[in-house]
Amino acid sequence: MMYRIEWISKYTSYRGHGSWFKPGNKKMLEDSIEFMNKEYRGQFDHWLVGDSSVSAPCGKASHEKAKGSS
């Protein structure tokens, strides 16, 4: 199972996500979500998503991949 943080802007409804991480990073992701939901209260909601079918390499956000492909 791989995990990543997803979020939505409460102002624009824009949705985004971070990179996929291995299970050993789940606690770090949960702690980050707790911090960000306090820091950006009223602006963004963050949550954890898990997917057992993902085998993407860690450390590359979707926007970084898009920049490298142009």
Image (cartoon, rainbow, N blue to C red):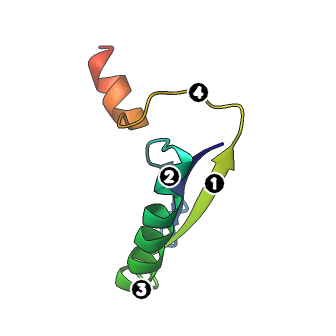
Q: CA distance from mark 1 to mark 4?
A: 14 Å
Q: Secondary structure at mark 1?
A: strand
Name the residue type under label 4.
Answer: Ser
Q: Secondary structure at mark 3?
A: helix
Q: Which residue is mark 3?
A: 38
Q: Which residue is mark 2?
A: 24
Q: CA distance from mark 3 to mark 1?
A: 19 Å
Q: Say which mark, if any, is on residue 14.
A: none
Q: CA distance from mark 2 to mark 4?
A: 15 Å
Going from the N terminus, do you reach mark 1 or mark 4 first?
1
Q: Quadrant of the N terminus?
A: top right
Q: Say which mark, if any, is on residue 49.
A: 1
Whether residue 43 appears in this view of the structure is no
Name the one closer to the observer, 51 or 16.
51
Name the residue type under label 1.
Answer: Val
Q: Secondary structure at mark 2?
A: helix
Q: CA distance from mark 2 to mark 3?
A: 24 Å
Q: Which residue is mark 4?
A: 55
Name the residue located 35 percent from the left edge and 37 percent from the top edge. Answer: 59
Q: Position of residue 64 (x, y in %)?
A: 31, 31
Q: Give the number of the mark in front: 4 or 3.
A: 4
Q: Quadrant of the C terminus?
A: top left
Going from the N terminus, do you reach mark 3 or mark 1 first?
3
Name the one closer to the observer, 49 or 39.
49
Q: Position of residue 46 (x, y in %)?
A: 52, 68
